[in-house]
Image (spheres, rainbow, N blue to C red):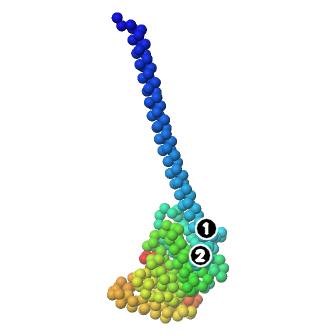
Amino acid sequence: MVNKRLVFTVTGMIIFVAVILGYVHFSKISRNEKKVNQQTMSQTQTIQQADTETEKEEVNASGDELENVTAGSEEYRGFLLDNVLHSPNEGDIHYNVYIPDAYDGTKEYALYVTLPGYQGLYFQGVGENIRTEDFGFEAQKYITDMIIVAPQLNDWGQTSADQTIELTQYFLTHYIINPSKVYINGYSGGGETLSLVLAKQPELYTAALMCSSQWDGAYEPVVEMKTPVYFVIGESDEYYGSEPFKEAYQQIHELYKEQGLSESEIDKLVVLDVKDKDYFEGTPVTYQHGGGYLFCRDKEIMGWLFNQ
């Protein structure tokens, strides 16, 4: 007869040993899992730290880029005056700028650069270009979602042309700009600067408006890139006369003709608009060279520019 007490004792010992072995086994698994979890957390923290450092680098890089500009402190009719782009290549570039309140960097905006005549150069006084010329204000009637840059340059030669290019490239790089909607105009001396800009980098601009000025640059780059240009001037402009624009138009027209373009195709790329004395009669403009006052308010002229 089996001793029941012995059976219970042996069974109890077996259960006890099984519990101990199970505890050791699961403790080992738990330690391994904990070790794996710790390694995973460590790796995750390392990755997160790396991401944070990358973000910091990106922020710092952005900050360094923004440090290249000293922002102005005075406003005039929505324009922030006397901002300065500190270019290592072109020196300090002074400009006034209008940025719509809705701009938040989430969608592309048009860009418009307006170059002043002699009376708007920087030595004439901060903001004189937009106080004496209304191109930047009239432009807002055609495209509301548009950043407008009004440089205050120091001359109407190559230095100002290079600074205009540098400033345009800055805005194309640092703002969300639609590259197919980049417009530029130049009035009087600003038109001379504009011709030099177009002779160097016409590909930056969708279309150009030349007002009461003359062409100083080469023609071939403009024709090669097919950048549309509109010439407008008074027939008896007191400063330039209308002949320089007529000559520039003819030169560009002939180059397109040599390329085999039809007259209708050429008409879309270059326009000559010479205003006779009747255009100025009964207006606040008492001399034709001051035609910029009227040209920027002319829907046909400004509409041509912003419909390109």
Residue 116 vertical placement versus 174 (above, below): below
Mark 2 vs 1, N-terminal side: 1
The disc at residue 270 is none
Q: Position of residue 239 (x, y in %)?
A: 57, 92
Question: Where does label 1 land, which residue?
Answer: 67
**In which quadrant will I find the C terminus?**
bottom left
Left or right of 143, for residue 78: right
Q: Secondary structure at mark 2?
A: loop
Residue 87 falls in image quadrant: bottom right
Of tags 2 and 1, the one toward the viewer is 2
Q: Could you say which is closer to the camera, residue 125 or residue 70? A: 70
Q: Position of residue 200 (x, y in %)?
A: 48, 83
> What distance separates the C-alpha of mark 2 from that of mark 1?
13 Å
The amino acid type found where label 1 is placed reads Glu
Residue for point 51% across, 89% down: 216
Question: Where does label 2 land, which residue?
Answer: 88
Residue for point 60% across, 81% down: 153
Residue 100 vertical placement versus 275 (above, below): above
Q: Position of residue 262 (x, y in %)?
A: 33, 86
Q: Position of residue 272 (x, y in %)?
A: 44, 88
Q: Could you say which is closer to the camera, residue 126 or residue 56? A: 56
